[in-house]
Amino acid sequence: MKTRTLESETAAKLYTEKLPNCRNFRDMGGIGTSSGKVVKSGLLYRSGRLTYLTCEELQFLTELGISKIIDLRSHDEIAAHPDRIPCNADYLPVYAEIPDFSLEAIIQLFREAAADRADTEKYIISSYRKMPNLLGPLFRELFTIFTSPAYVPTLIHCTGGKDRTGLFAALFLYALGVEDDVIMEDYLMSGHTGDDLVHTAERYSGSFRKFGVDVSPEITHPLLTTKPEYLQAALDAIRREYGSVVRYLDTVAAVGAAEIQNLRTLFLI
């Protein structure tokens, strides 16, 4: 099954052109479900942080009709790199704090990895296993917003738009009835690849020298990429503890049959 409609792929090229300072910006619409329906466009967008948007980019977000910005970053991340918000949009920080992704934890990880005492990929996989329960209360809050009759077009983001945002997006698509392989394909769109990964890893590794950490760019790759093993680790953890993603949504996120029906009524055509 093709992940996205031709119209949504065309729109993605426009977003890249219009939003060069907003990484991973895309419409969640245009994705097909197992029932043959398609996620509506223009209702839910996702991205990385909005720190470096120009006035022209902010105006473009306004023109898209985005009325709410949901920020999944931690208190420290927001303080260090505050968003720029379109003038007509409400801003809602929900503070998805993940200790494994804190600056102090990553500094220690890179120190250990540089000395061959830690594996960054195994670290990320372990972190993904923890995320479903760690972020469960926040997902409950988010799905309450997304099932509200007062829902408005929304942009949801974290720092890179791939881990916290990526897991939420996967659960959102599961609730809409999107198949596993399509969800995985959508998740994998968010990581750095190719020359972009090389250049970003060089900058990222260099930024840790001020903390006295000399780490090679290659060691940082797992924090900048998306791999099937990462999302799969979270989904496997959910299925081990709850039996299924649907049961997790019901038990942890308070998304039962009625809420799923509300989501599908609003977001599917």
Image: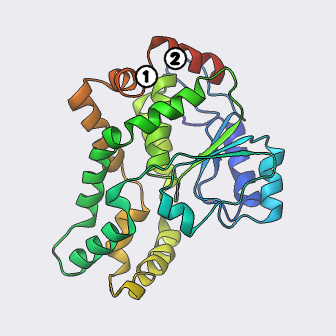
Q: Nearer the viewer, residue 71 or 6?
A: 71
Image position of 26 with respect to 142: above or below: below
> Which residue in the protein does label 1 denote?
254
Q: Nearer the viewer, residue 178 or 257?
A: 257
User: Residue 125 at what x, y percent from top left?
Assistant: 27, 53
Q: Earlier in the sequence, mark 2 or mark 1?
A: 1
Amino acid identity at mark 1: Ala
> Residue 259 bears which disc, if any?
2
Nearer to me, 119 or 66: 66
Whether residue 159 is visible to the viewer of this picture, yes or no, is: yes
What's the distance in space between the residues labelled 2 and 1, CA to CA? 8 Å
Which residue is pictured at 61% across the width and 38% down the height? 28
Question: Which color mode does the image show?
Answer: rainbow
Q: Residue furthest left?
A: 117
Relative vertical location of residue 160 with respect to residue 68 in this rendering, above or below = below
Rendering coords of residue 121 (x, y %)? 27, 61
Q: Quadrant of residue 41?
A: top right
**Residue 246 position in % (x across, y down):** 37, 22
Q: Secondary structure at mark 1?
A: loop
